[in-house]
Image: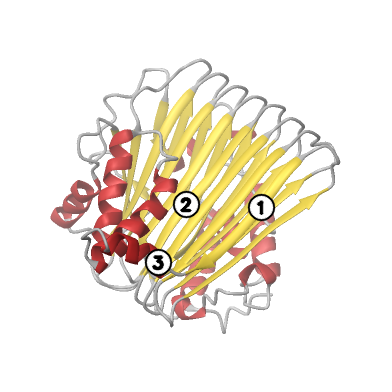
Amino acid sequence: MIDLEKAPALLRDAVGALEGAFAGDGAPDPFADLRQRARASFEAKGLPTTRDEAWKYTDLRPALKPDYRSALGLDADAAAVDAAIEGARIPGLEATRVVVVNGQLDTERSDLEGVPSKVTLASLAHTVANGAEGLADTFGRHVDLDRDAFAALNSASSLDGFYLEVPRGVAVETPIHVVHVITADAATYVQERNLIVVGEAAQATVLESFAVVGDAETFRNDLTEIVAAQSAVVRHVRIQDEGPDAHGVSLVQTYQSRDSDVSTLTFTFASGTVRNNTVMVPDGEGCQSTLGGLYLCHGDQHVDTNTLVDHVAPGCQSNELFKGIVYDQSTGVFNGKVFVQREAQQTNAYQQSQGVVLSPDARHYSKPELEIYADDVKCSHGSTTGAVEPEHIFYLRSRGVSESDARAMLLYAFAHDVVEMVDLELVRDALDARISERLK
């Protein structure tokens, strides 16, 4: 149980906000049962600690210590927010722009002109309030409320974010670029909820960028659900570049129907203590599931990646690749599990984690796992952690390359494998440029 008297101010305030959420404005809440179950789970489970196996290497207590205030309703420095949005822009990329400031969709800064007429792209809070058709079959349906307290807290709250619904047979040709901005002139926390629903034989690409305006510490608790119908194709990329004082826990939860193809990739460049959870459930024969990520950690940065692929249907394939580069006193963590249920015969699952440690005080922990209950499968996993090989540096130096350039070239090649998983060339170019900048 969570002892609120001893809990961090962030959690006391968040639980206090639940009272208002449950009181509401008198209008019926179509998700009242979900919120009640989520709140009960949150209060019963308590905060994760290093005694929990899944959190063995990540202690959130230091990140929760500041006296955070809620971001909701905060006045934002317009010029600074605009600069952050501009800084997140991908050079040359024509995209539909969605802006979320302090957890709320900013319609004035968003540019939705390129959205096809049949596609819904709107505020999630507004969509829930107006009871969009089909929402009851998707919102919160596939999130395991008992997996961690932060997902339950998010689900218990009345939150905003973006809602994307692509109807059957519609291909959204223009990528959708969502820019999330937190304004922080004092310690600030934000909760956000997003939902992406892609209909049968429909297609969409969603790129998310995260930024912080201000020098104060922040804590983000965000949850994004992706629901892909039969034969749908979804490409999802996240770029976390918020700064060394940006902490938080995030969850990307995907659910796939037959013959769908979903990929979700996360790139973390600048952060404080961050836990990135990804859960993929291919629940129909013939699903393709791809998840991957890259984290470059310096200073005392701590990035923890936790993944779960739950194969519950036969004839599906999953491909998982995560890489980390850690130096200074930073820490990288990868903990990935692949479940193959008894019914999921002829599953093909691949999982790989690789880390490079560049200084004596840096740490990289990796724990890939397979749990298989079917007998006709092809599953493999692997993990490697090490340093840059001296002979590789020597080889490049013998050809006139300086030692620093040789090291950067090797690390760039190591990281680029994950970048290659991104479909959009201009996004790959932007990621390559950011990686090169960080490796100088």
| Residue at the image position 22 percent from the left and 65 percent from the top | 402
Whether 384 is drawn above or below 434: the answer is below
Q: Secondary structure at mark 3?
A: helix
Can residue 182 be seen at all in this image of the molecule? Answer: no
Answer left or right for 299 relative to 130.
Answer: left
Quarter assignment of residue 358: bottom left
Going by the picture, which residue comes out furthest to the left?
A: 79
| Residue at the image position 58 percent from the left and 74 percent from the top | 57
- Tell me which numbered mark, 1 or 2, is placed earlier along the sequence: 2
Residue occupied by mark 2: 293
Answer left or right for 377 relative to 73.
Answer: right
x then y, percent, for residue 134: 59, 28
Specify the amino acid type for callout 1.
Answer: His
Q: Secondary structure at mark 2?
A: strand
Q: Nearer the viewer, mark 2 or mark 3?
A: 3
- Tell me which numbered mark, 2 or 3, is placed earlier along the sequence: 2
Few, some or many residues within 10 Å of mark 1 (<14, 14–19, 20+): some
C-alpha span from label 2 to label 3 = 27 Å
Few, some or many residues within 10 Å of mark 3 (<14, 14–19, 20+): few
Whether 78 is drawn above or below 135: the answer is below
| Residue at the image position 64 percent from the left and 60 percent from the top | 39
Residue situated in front as seen by the camera: 313 or 28: 313
x then y, percent, for residue 396: 30, 60
C-alpha span from label 1 to label 2 = 16 Å
Residue occupied by mark 3: 391
Specify the amino acid type for callout 2.
Answer: Gly
Residue occupied by mark 1: 381
Residue situated in front as seen by the camera: 88 or 390: 390
C-alpha span from label 1 to label 3 = 27 Å
